[in-house]
Image (cartoon, helix red, strand yellow):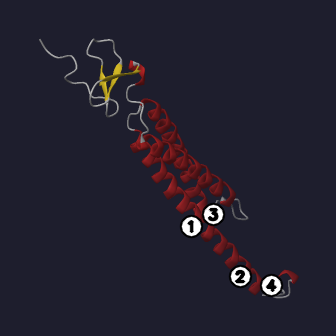
Amino acid sequence: MTDPTANWAPAEPGWYQDPSGTGRSLWWDGRAWSGHTLAAAQHGRRFRWPSILSFVLAVTGFCLSVLAGLMNLFYVGFDDTGTPQPMTVFAIIWFIISGFAALATGFAILALIRRAAAIGLAVAAVTIATVGLACSLQFAVWNMNLAAHAAESYCHSQPHDTACAGR
């Protein structure tokens, strides 16, 4: 006859499945069984770093996605003729990609509940969001440089304007 406990691993060192088949775990102190027991539902309740790491990465990815999207919305601009600036189209496209990062974050949180592929989804969300944030920062700097250049060009063409007095 086969041993039903042969493939069973204890939840913690010292805890072993009750050989009578009750589904409980008994504590073996090294000499004898003690009176301490664990119900079947308590097996495997250990502190797991991958779950916590996945959750932190998922939340970070979501926050970075929102930040990148907000930065893009504030720096989207059009010139005087109503034509979008060259980086505006890129900003809108990246905002959509950041939305996918937020979706990946949501799926990562769902995966945490089911403990399947959580780290992969969370890392993907953070990667997409981080690239989005970097692009947004680069876009913001580019846009500020463009505005400074435009102001300088205007002051060169209109030297008597009071707004250009200090330039």
Amino acid on which disc 2 is placed:
Ser
Q: Secondary structure at mark 2?
A: helix
Measuring from the top left, give residue 14's x and y in whole percent.
31, 31
Are dots 2 and 4 in contact, CB under 8 Å? no
31 or 133: nearer the eye? 31
- Horizontal relation, residue 54 to residue 31: left or right: right
Q: Amino acid at mark 1?
A: Gln
Residue 47 located left or right of residue 102: left
User: Which residue is disc 4 drawn over?
Assistant: 158
Earlier sequence position, callout 1 versus callout 3: 3
Mark 2 or mark 4: whose residue is earlier in sequence: 2
Pointer 3 and pointer 4: residues touching (CB < 8 Å)? no
Q: Is residue 98 visible?
A: no
| Rendered image quadrant of residue 42 | top left
What's the CA distance linking mark 3 and mark 4? 24 Å
Mark 3 residue crowding within 10 angstroms, few (<14) / some (14–19) / many (20+):
few
Residue at horizontal 38%, vertical 29%? 44
In this rendering, the label closer to the viewer, 2 or 1: 1
Q: Residues within 10 Å of mark 2 (few under 14, many from 20)?
A: few
Rounded to the nearest angstrom, the CA distance separating label 2 from label 4 is 9 Å
Q: Residue at x 21, y 24 (%)?
A: 7
> In the displayed image of the protein, which residue is found farthest to the left?
1
Most extreme residue toward the right is: 162
| Residue that badge 2 annotates | 153
Is the C terminus in the top left, top right, bottom left or bottom right quadrant?
A: bottom right
62 lies above or below 164: above
Name the kind of residue labelled 4 in the image.
Gln
The earlier-in-sequence mark between 2 and 1 is 1
Distance (Cα) linking label 2 and label 1: 22 Å
Q: What residue is pinned by disc 1?
A: 138
